[in-house]
Image (cartoon, helix red, strand yellow):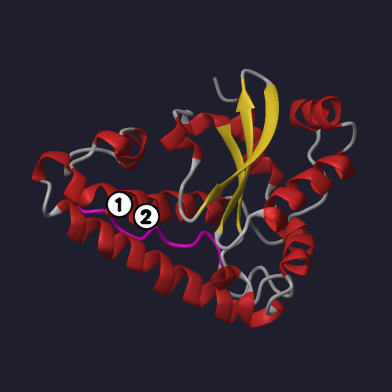
Amino acid sequence: MAFTLPPLPYGFDALEPHIDAKTMEIHHGKHHQAYVNNLNAALEKAPELQSKTIEELLKNVNSAPEAVRTPIRNNGGGHWNHSFFWRLMGPKAGGQPSGALGDAIKSTFGSFDKFKEQFAAAGVGRFGSGWAWLLNDGGKLSITSTPNQDNPLMEGKSPNSVLLGLDVWEHAYYLKYQNRRPDYITAWWNVVNWGDVAKRFGAK
């Protein structure tokens, strides 16, 4: 069963003015599609892996056959990361999380603003391309970052433990923000779908 590009849950222009429509169109239709195409091409060389879910592939990437290990890491990671990323955003979003998630953020980081500062620092400080993540380990929150299209699943984390992810590859922001990654991150808070994040935080 070949992997497919998931549709965006909103229009390309739905995140304007914070993330522009042209970036969304290229990011989803070109970059994410390429990860899907390249992952499927790699798996043609490893038929024994074709029945695996994307999560199973990434969790066991280090034991994959050497010939497809790097393509799975790069393109499988890109597919999972972006499928996750699209759901994290939405129109008329932003603000602050409430309830149990909001309480956990405040108790862990001191305040929502301090959390944003630390999360943004993880994104700005990631040299080159990569991602910043908010993780939940049994109610304990932590911030981390990964290079390229790596993600916490490759480090043994369960998908449910990954609450939030921010793409800091230049293709995510360069048309609108050029080299101003901090400005992109500041704007991105306005489109975070905290309801989606809270559902994962509350999942058992």
What residue is shown at x 64% (from left), y 69% (from top)?
A: 14
Q: Is residue 164 left or right of residue 152?
A: right
Question: Does residue 161 lie above or below 130 as drawn?
Answer: above
Residue drawn at point x = 30 percent, y = 58 percent: 4
| Disc number for residue 104 | none
Q: Is residue 170 visible?
A: yes
Q: Amino acid at mark 2?
A: Asn
Q: Residue at x 74, y 30 (%)?
A: 101
Give the residue number, with chain letter if any, for mark 1: 70
Question: Can you tell which quarter of the image residue 195 is in?
Answer: top right
The image shows a total of numbered marks equal to 2
User: Which image quarter is the C terminus in?
Assistant: top right
Res 37 quadrant in image? bottom left
Residue 167 % position (x, y): 58, 58
In the image, taking residue 189 as reference, residue 77 lies left or right, namely left
Which of the 4 quarters of the picture holds residue 79?
bottom left
Q: Residue flagged by tag 1: what amino acid is it? A: Thr
Predominant secondary structure, magenta span: loop
Tell me the crowding category of disc 1: few under 14, some 14 to 19, or many 20 or more residues within 10 angstroms, Cα based.
Answer: some
Labels 1 & 2 near each other (Cβ < 8 A) = yes
Q: CA distance from mark 1 to mark 2?
A: 6 Å
Image coordinates of residue 35 in percent, x first then y, are: 35, 62
Say which element carries label 1.
helix
Q: Which residues are magenta?
A: 1-10
Q: 146 or 36: nearer the eye?
A: 146
Specify whether 33 is left or right of 174: left
In this figure, which residue is indicated by the disc labeled 2?
A: 74
Residue at position x 20%, y 45% in the image: 66
Looking at this view, is 105 or 144 the one in front? 144
Is residue 1 visible from the viewing direction of this image? no
